[in-house]
Image: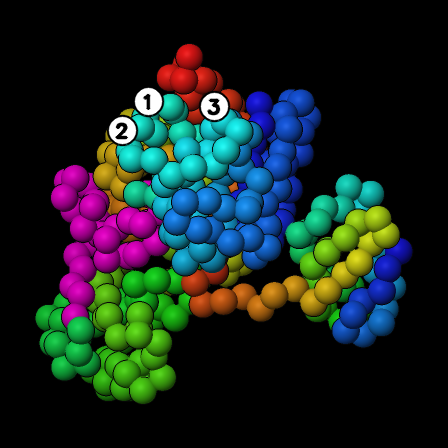
């Protein structure tokens, strides 16, 4: 269990969470990036840039 | 085998691939490209022991440069060193997928259109113009509706279906005023009056893995736009077009988008960092497994060359 950096709500990560993985905060909807897994640390995910995506 | 994954975000697509590779017992080196520098002769990214490197960068610019840098290093062996292309082919540099050539062509819609047309692959009629005046001329020559796209970009962003001259003038003025330099290349395309769906085929070096249709009321039917997906059975005509389109852009793991024109198909887009989550869900095919199979053959080919 860890905390959303934006709204402070509890965020539960799956056991197989991966560094670099993007998860949504269920409370505020912010995209969060998993920056560490033991213990889990979240950061606000980087903004999508104009040239991102397929 | 040792697989390097270049990434800056792990989405469901990357996660599916990582899980598949690890289940098969492969060693995966995740390389967050934001943490590394790529010099002319060397990089601090841990790529030296990789048998194959997979570019999963979400950003087109990163993808284009990184694949080029990786190909310039002889990253097999204990040291990462640059060499001439002859030396590299002798020593068997590590394959990067997709290749720098493929990334460069697919990252730019104008280059993709030229490559497809040169290869005789049917693709929508397209004109590139560099000023708002010549862009308006091109738009008028196609008539309405027609389509205006940025040459770089994705997920259907900043694409316009232009219905009238007044709309064309307004959009061109906005682009000229607000645009990034890449938006001062005006890519004008005929509107293909397709049924309310398009076809996405994922292919490895031209060999189709699986296909789906994407449908929606909106003229853009990207999965990212929330369209409905369904499995699509690939016929010979589609398979041939996919093979030709893949060859045209340099091969690799590609998402090839086709539209039905009524008497055949037209290829309107080729994606080089393909998202496969939606395809995996829409079809019975295990797409990550097919991708892993292909990566294994890529790595094995390289070992033979080296030996
Ligand atoms: Zn939150």
Which numbered disc covers residue B86? 2
Q: How many numbered marks are there?
A: 3
Q: List x then y, in percent, for residue A31.
A: 68, 64
Which numbered disc covers residue B90? 1
Q: Which residues are magenta?
A: B102-129
Mark 2 or 3, nearer chain start: 2
Q: Are marks 2 and 1 on the same chain?
A: yes
Identify residue for label 3.
B299
Distance CA(mark 1)–CA(mark 3): 16 Å
Q: Is residue B167 visible?
A: no
* Residue B122 is a magenta residue: yes
Q: Is residue B63 above or below residue A10?
A: above
As helix, strand or loop, the secondary structure at mark 2 comes to: helix
Disc 1 crowd, CA 10 A, few/some/many (<14, 14-19, 20+): few
Q: Residue at x 41, y 33 (%)?
A: B74
Q: Decide which of B109, B100 is in the foreground and name it.
A: B100
Disc 3 crowd, CA 10 A, few/some/many (<14, 14-19, 20+): many
Q: Is mark 1 within 8 Å of ligand 1?
A: no
Q: Is residue B11 left or right of residue B265?
A: right
Q: Chain of mark 3?
A: B
As helix, strand or loop, the secondary structure at mark 3 comes to: helix
Q: Chain of mark 2?
A: B
Camera-side mark, 1 or 3: 1
Distance CA(mark 2)–CA(mark 1): 6 Å
């Amino acid at each position: 269990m860890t905390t959303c950096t934006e709204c402070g709500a509890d965020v539960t990560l799956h056991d197989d969470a991966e560094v670099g993985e993007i998860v949504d905060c269920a409370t505020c909807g912010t995209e969060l990036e998993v920056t560490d897994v033991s213990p889990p640390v979240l950061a606000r995910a980087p903004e999508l840039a104009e040239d991102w995506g397929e | 085998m040792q697989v390097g994954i270049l990434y800056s975000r792990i989405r469901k697509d990357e996660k599916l691939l990582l899980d598949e590779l690890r289940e098969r017992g492969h060693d995966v080196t995740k390389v967050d490209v934001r943490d590394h520098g790529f010099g002319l002769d060397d990089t601090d990214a841990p790529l030296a022991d990789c048998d194959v490197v997979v570019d999963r960068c979400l950003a087109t610019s990163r993808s284009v440069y990184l694949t080029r840098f990786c190909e310039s290093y002889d990253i097999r062996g204990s040291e990462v060193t640059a060499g001439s292309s002859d030396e590299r082919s002798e020593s068997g540099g590590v394959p990067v997928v997709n290749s720098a050539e493929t990334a460069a062509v697919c990252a730019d819609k104008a280059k993709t259109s030229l490559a497809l047309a040169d290869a005789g692959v049917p693709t929508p009629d397209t004109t590139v113009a560099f000023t708002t005046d010549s862009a308006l001329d091109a738009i008028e020559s196609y008539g309405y509706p027609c389509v205006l796209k940025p040459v770089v970009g994705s997920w259907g962003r900043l694409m316009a279906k232009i219905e009238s001259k007044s709309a064309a003038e307004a959009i061109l003025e906005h682009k000229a005023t607000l645009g990034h330099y890449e938006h001062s290349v005006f890519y004008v395309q005929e509107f293909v009056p397709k049924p309310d769906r398009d076809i996405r085929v994922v292919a490895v070096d031209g060999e189709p893995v699986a296909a789906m249709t994407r449908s929606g009321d909106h003229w853009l039917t990207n999965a990212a736009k929330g369209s409905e997906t369904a499995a699509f059975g690939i016929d010979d005509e589609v398979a041939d077009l996919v093979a030709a389109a893949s060859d045209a852009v340099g091969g690799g793991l590609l998402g090839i988008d086709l539209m039905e024109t009524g008497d055949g198909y037209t290829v309107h887009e080729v994606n080089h960092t393909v998202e496969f989550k939606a395809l995996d869900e829409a079809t019975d095919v295990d797409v990550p497994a097919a991708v892993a199979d292909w990566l294994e053959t890529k790595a094995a080919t390289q070992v033979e060359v080296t030996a």
